[in-house]
Amino acid sequence: MKRLPLSLVLGGLITGALVAAALISRFWTPHDPVGMDILNRLKAPGDVGLLGTDQIGRDVFSILMAGAWTSLGIAFAATLIGGTIGTLVGVTAAARGGWLERLVMSVNGVLFAFPPILSAILLGALMGPGAVTSITAIGLFMIPVFARVTRGAALQIWSRDYIQAARMAGKGQALITLEHVIPNISAQIIVQLAIQTGLGILTEAGLSFLGMGVSPPTPSWGRMLSEAQTFLSSAPHLVLAPGCAIALAVLGLNLLGDGLRDLTDPKRGSGA
Amino acid sequence: MPPLKKFSRQIAGLVLLLAVTSLVIFLAIEAAPGDPAQIMLGTNAQADTVAALRAELGLDRPLMVRYLAWLGGVFTGDLGTSYTYGTPVAELIGERLRVTLPLTAMATLLAVAISLPLGVWAAQRPNGPVDTLASVFSQFGIAVPNFWIGLLLILGLALGLGWFPTGGFPGWGAGWLAVQALILPAVALALPQAAVLTRVTRAAVIEVTNEDFVRTARAKGLTRNRALWRHTVPNALLPVVTMLGLQIPFLISGAVLVENVFTLPGIGTLAYSALSQRDLIVVQNVVLLFAIVVMVVNVIVDALYVLLDPRLRGRA
């Protein structure tokens, strides 16, 4: 049997652990992630709880677990929505070509000019902060990313002989896209899903850090960091824990994406 | 297509894109809840006072007229007056750009200064020790949020060692102190960029090294180093420049976050505070400015292609 790429194993383990933590947090955390305990505020890691407590005595490890659900949930929802729309747009553009393709690429250009933080500012003005704003802002930016990747990949498939054969057999563009193009580019789509979910986590953290993400008391890694700013010198563990969680999550998903790419396309793997 | 025709076509496309983008921004801000006149006067204001201010601000004119007036103002530099600061928006933006532009420029220079040598070095021996180190650096650099790097830098170098201020900006009149205030934010902003660029540089150099013309150069008797710097690196710069252009949206997002961490009076903090104070006219103009920057940089990157790629230059 072929040896699995190291990045795939590492990425899979990290991501798996994170998803498990997020799921478990739905019905169990060591302490209540929103329960205050003023007497035990700003305790160092190990003194109270595994990672100490925050400024109102909440257990940091429990908030991290519950925050994993928020971060992963928002990032994954945004990537799934943006990825689905982007993929549909990309494969349609590749299949139809002509003015439609040019139009799609132009709209892509407009969307790409709006980094998530920017569209979140615009959307925040429109509908206030919250999970929906975050998902929309992140998802919007994913559309051009996925459209670009899938269009490029789909165009390559369209030049293959078996597509000619399918055409000769009288199949239409939609059917060929469904039966031949999408299955053949699914590996690239899955790789992008992993990598973009990682970027989504990074962006969600940034939005929550600015106060444009989910509203309190819903736990979120980004807001933990923004609250920890005030206690930077007195309780540095409050800055270290959520930052490590974010970095680990993004690292895991990136490694997973790289590993999947190595697995499905060995040529593009370690060489370049 | 001849370069000049291609270029003019791109400019036309850019103008069209900007028109659409500005309309989207305008409509989004229009649809946003909150009447500017009401916000400026407070909730206790009389209805006729509010109406008078609305008329004074020109808010009672039809939608299309206001859009065109705004667009016209963008060209003449009259972007309206901030609801909360009471100063012209153009002046406000100009003032804030004096922090954000040097910050992003410093960050970009730093990122290139780290990633170019590191990427080239890593590419010399793929999977060697330097390459492994570079790849670990880029994996972590991409994963670590820049605002967290900012917080760690404050914790270690500002609070801990006291080498840098923890935040704030003394103004350019303060000379070295002003530069010093931008160093940590620039490092925080640069590291994720450097991580991405290192990856791209390494891949590009490896690819070009395997090309025929590099082998020819070596066969002609050029030393390994000379072939590298005369032939390989210049040709590998293309994807690096492209990536620099593609990174602009992230640089802008990063600036908003990092300026916030270091409480720098830049364009990012302006956008953020304008949003929380519902100073929508500022939000509208700042968002447009960011969008213009991203789009214009994309066109410039395309144009640079012709300048950097000897093959494309030959066709011109």
Image (spheres, helix red, strand yellow):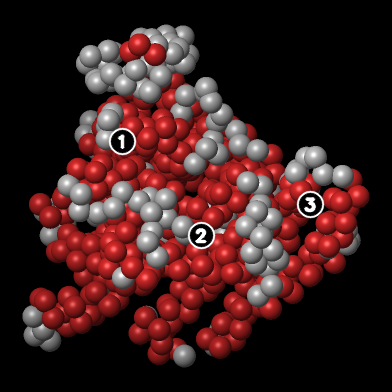
Please name the residue that numbered disc 1 is placed on: A232
Please name the residue that numbered disc 3 is placed on: B37
Q: CA distance from mark 2 to mark 3?
A: 24 Å
Going by the numbered disc 2, the residue's amino acid type is Ile
Q: Residue at x 89, y 45 (%)?
A: B47
Q: CA distance from mark 2 to mark 1?
A: 25 Å
Q: Residue at x 26, y 16 (%)?
A: A50
- Report whether residue A210 is seen: yes
Residue A185 located left or right of residue B74: left
Going by the numbered disc 1, the residue's amino acid type is Leu
Q: Give the camera-side residue of B129 and B263.
A: B263
Q: Nearer the viewer, mark 2 or mark 1?
A: 1
Q: Nearer the viewer, mark 2 or mark 3?
A: 3
Please name the residue that numbered disc 2 is placed on: B267
Q: Chain of mark 3?
A: B
Q: Is residue A246 above or below residue B173?
A: above
Q: Residues within 10 Å of mark 1 (few under 14, many from 20)?
A: some
- Report whether residue A194 is seen: no
Q: Residue at x 39, y 47 (%)?
A: B261
Residue B26 image position (x, y, % from top left):
73, 58
Have a look at marks 2 and 1 and say if they share a chain. Answer: no
Q: Secondary structure at mark 3?
A: helix
